[in-house]
Image (cartoon, rainbow, N blue to C red):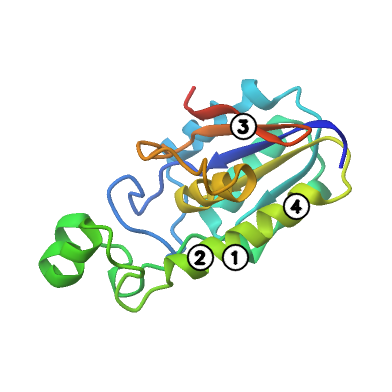
């Protein structure tokens, strides 16, 4: 690994399925026009960054966001790589629902979830499994022998889990770190990973 480089983490933009209010995990909902504009607004931040790779979740909202950013940066298509491990967590029986709808349909689960006692949504992926697969992917890409910065385009949960994987569990994600749609988080490597920019939105 080179001594100094950066890992840029981007959450996809708003979707036709309203990612701002609905629990879309494995649902493959496309970007909306608003979402494309949100991602396009990141272009000036990234245009002159020497990206070696653009790694993204295979879900369409992340794949299209990655393609938009690669085009804005003038990167060839062979620098885009889909990694299945970067998919959002599965919300199981709650996919596509709002918080109010989940609370109405699964009141006991929602009470445990709100108290921080639920490890998985009904029929969904456990948080421990999700954290482990994101950590495996991010640590592998971060340690790879590539020259230049790395752009990772994925989901809210992916970005939140990437931080403790790289910075250590004692640091983790700040409790208030919500990872807004179309936001950018940057980590810098200089004898270890450090947080440089947290959840900025242009």
Q: Nearer the viewer, residue 62 or 152?
A: 152
- The residue labelled by disc 3 is 186
- Left or right: 105, with 76 as reference point: left
Task: Name the residue at 67% across, 53% down.
Answer: 138
Examine the image and state in which quarter residue 107 appears. Answer: bottom left
Return the disc, 4 or 1, that comes first in the chain's sequence: 1
Q: Nearer the viewer, residue 150 or 117?
A: 117
Return the disc, 4 or 3, that comes first in the chain's sequence: 4
- The residue labelled by disc 1 is 133
* CA gap, disc 2 and disc 3: 21 Å
Task: Name the residue at 60% across, 51% down.
Answer: 165
* CA gap, disc 2 and disc 1: 5 Å
Percent coordinates x, y for residue 9 in the rendering: 60, 40
Is residue 139 positioned above or below 151 on the image?
below
- Left or right: 34, with 184 as reference point: left
* CA gap, disc 3 and disc 1: 20 Å
Return the disc, 2 or 4, that comes first in the chain's sequence: 2
Local SS, label 1: helix
- Residue furthest toward the bottom? 123
- Residue furthest toward the front? 170
- The residue labelled by disc 4 is 141
Return the disc, 2 or 3, that comes first in the chain's sequence: 2
**Do callouts 2 and 1 mark residues in contact (Cβ within 8 Å)?**
yes
* CA gap, disc 4 and disc 3: 15 Å
Task: Name the residue at 62% across, 26% down.
Answer: 43
- The residue labelled by disc 2 is 130
**Do callouts 4 and 3 mark residues in contact (Cβ within 8 Å)?**
no
Is residue 116 positioned above or below 170 on the image?
below
């Amino acid at each position: 690994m080179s001594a100094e480089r950066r890992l840029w983490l981007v959450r996809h933009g708003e979707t036709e399925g309203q990612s701002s209010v609905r629990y879309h995990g494995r649902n493959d909902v496309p970007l909306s026009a608003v979402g494309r504009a949100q991602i396009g607004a990141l272009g000036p931040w990234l245009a002159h960054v020497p990206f070696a790779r653009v790694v993204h979740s295979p879900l369409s909202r992340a794949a299209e966001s990655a393609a938009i950013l690669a085009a804005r940066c003038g990167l060839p298509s062979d620098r885009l790589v889909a990694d299945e491990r970067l998919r959002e967590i599965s919300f199981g029986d709650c996919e596509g629902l709002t918080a109010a709808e989940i609370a109405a349909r699964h009141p006991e689960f929602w009470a445990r979830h709100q108290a921080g006692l639920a490890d998985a949504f009904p029929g969904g992926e456990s948080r421990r499994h999700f954290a482990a697969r994101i950590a495996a992917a991010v640590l592998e890409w971060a340690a790879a022998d590539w020259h230049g910065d790395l752009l990772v385009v994925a989901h809210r949960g992916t970005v939140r889990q990437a931080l403790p994987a790289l910075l250590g569990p004692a640091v983790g994600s700040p409790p208030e770190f919500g990872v807004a749609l179309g936001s950018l988080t940057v980590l810098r490597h200089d004898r270890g990973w450090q947080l440089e920019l947290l959840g900025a939105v242009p």
